[in-house]
Image (cartoon, grey):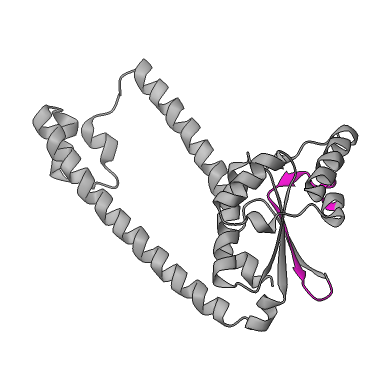
Amino acid sequence: MKGLITFIILLSVSSVSIARPVIPVGTPDDVQSQSQTQQQKSAKNSTAKSKSNFTAKELWDINGKNPPKVVLEFLENPTPKTAKRYLEWNRERAKKIDQAVALLNKMRQQEVKKRLKKIPISRIDNSKIVMFFSPTCPYCLRELSIIRKIKDDYPQIGISLYPINNPFLAEAKLNELGLGKYISYSDKNSKIARQITAIPFIVIKNKTDNKVKAEFTGETSYEKIISSM
């Protein structure tokens, strides 16, 4: 409780002296997803304003190759019957895409496990993860889930979690993830927090001498964190 009171005092002082904003940073996929969403909205609005100037074949025909018959029938003659057949075709195609993605993900996970097995376990056990986060940052919450998995897989790893704001909400979120006992309001973490401009921010250190091995800003993968130890 004494540590929490000290943290709140430091936080109130730093909030007055620090003008720079702390920006939540996600992965490139998040940026791409937002861009795609905006493009989809723009395309939808454009479609609502004007009718297509292309024939059914022109919408699909590439180098003289036409779409499957079920697709062409729906494009040329959109009726409840052709729409139903088209949706059935689309569902089957979606299943195959899901199967392909699942297979590639499984292969990638196997490759990751092989690479991580090459890292000496003594090196991992001698490592400590220090993470700075906000309980209202969605990227931070996803990263905390990765930290939890790392802790489950490698119990000897040190963990130190510093919330840059909303300490009471932060403690509640960490308790939900089973990470409540790793919250830290140390003076060292407070000094680092004053310099942070983007979150989540992760520092990988040696347990023995506190030497910094790596630093990551934004969402970071399980593999990258372990590989840096």
Q: Is residue 80 visible?
A: yes
Q: Is residue 201 left or right of residue 72?
A: right
Q: Quadrant of residue 187?
A: bottom right
Q: Residue at x 75, y 40 (%)?
A: 22
Residue 144 versus residue 155 in the image, above or below: above
Q: Quadrant of residue 122?
A: bottom right
Whether residue 9 is in magenta: the answer is: no
Depth order, front residue of 53/128? 128
Whether residue 204 is in magenta: the answer is: yes
Place of residue 3 in the rendered image (x, y in percent of width and height, measured from the top left): 81, 50
Q: Residue at x 90, y 35 (%)?
A: 17
**Residue extending furthest toward the top:** 49
Place of residue 215 in the rendered image (x, y in percent of width and height, measured from the top left): 74, 60
Task: Count numbered badges in the picture.
Answer: 0
Q: Residue at x 26, y 56 (%)?
A: 96
Residue 139 versus residue 21 in the image, above or below: below
- The quadrant of the picture occupied by the C terminus is bottom right
Place of residue 128 in the rendered image (x, y in percent of width and height, measured from the top left): 72, 68
Q: Residue at x 60, y 72 (%)?
A: 155
Q: Is residue 36 left or right of residue 79?
A: right
Q: Is residue 67 left or right of residue 38?
A: left
Depth order, front residue of 94/6? 6
| Residue range highlighted in magenta | 192-209
